Amino acid sequence: MEQSRNKFELVGQRERPLSARSVMASLLLGRRSARAGGGDLVRWCGLFGIAPGTARVALHRMTGAGELERDDHGEYLLVGPLARRQREQQSSLSAQLSVWDGTWRMAIAVGDARPARVRADVRTALKRARLAEWREGVWIRPANVPDLVEDPRCSWLDARPDADPVALADDLFAPRAWREVADDLLTQLHGATDIMRTDRELAIADAFLAGAAALRHIRVDPLLPAALLPDPWPGTALRDAYRHYQQEFNARARDWFRAGTS
């Protein structure tokens, strides 16, 4: 059977337009509370050249699409798919891995005919669980994630492929590509954190973009066992750098928002 070309995707590296939705969603995704006032969100969009009217329309559309919800205090909070993404990001920042014994976890998605929408939803769920498609309808990853979310629409089993595990991981998860991007993001995060300590406002927009890119990339870390990773591996270093960045950014952002209300 021919091997699938649908490898584990580095989703965090797709270029995304700087829309009002992406700016507001990224700000909320980076906040533990996942909420902010509408006025603050509109002001924040202004840092990126987005007009107030455009930001308000985006707020309305995101609320109508079930991505945001307005509470009794007039603040907007993440709900639906964006809330799930934030939970996944927080889980990625504190990922706990188990000792790997060489076993791989396999999901079989081939079964009775399903509508295209359902098949697409299953594929998305398996990607979110950090599996890669090994053969058509057959998804796999090392069994080192203790809280792996196993989609009930698939059949699940343990396996030990005959293929060399390092070569298989390289082929399916492209860890060297992830490492290359992570190294660049590490440099950007360190630079952004240092600059924020001395230039509180001029650096905040660029720092925000650096942090959002790092958080997206952490979310798509394949979380492979150490035995399958190229050395050195920057996963822990990138998470630590993001935590330090986040502390500095949150302090600068609080100052920026307070200055706008004084």
Image (tube, rainbow, N blue to C red):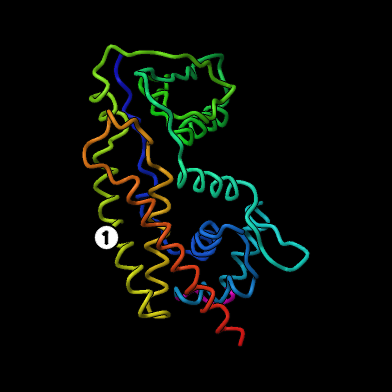
- Which is nearer the eye, 47 or 262? 262
Residue 137 visible in image: no
Quadrant in the picture for the C terminus: bottom right
Residue type (three-letter) at the residue carrying disc 1: Thr
Q: Is residue 23 above or below residue 221?
A: below
Most frequent secondary structure within the magenta stretch: loop
The structure residue drawn at horizontal position 36% and vertical position 68%, both measured from the top left corner, is: 193
Residue 110 visible in image: yes
Q: Which residues are magenta?
A: 49-53
Image spot of residue 87 (x, y percent): 56, 46
The structure residue drawn at horizontal position 39% and vertical position 19%, both measured from the top left corner, is: 104
- Which is nearer the eye, 50 or 154? 154
Quadrant in the picture for the N terminus: top left
- Which is nearer the eye, 16 or 207? 207
Q: Is residue 149 left or right of residue 226?
A: right
- Within-10-Å neighbours for mark 1: few <14, some 14–19, many 20+: few
Q: Given the current orientation, which residue lies at the most extreme bottom position? A: 262
Residue, disc 1: 187
The structure residue drawn at horizontal position 30% and vertical position 32%, both measured from the top left corner, is: 226
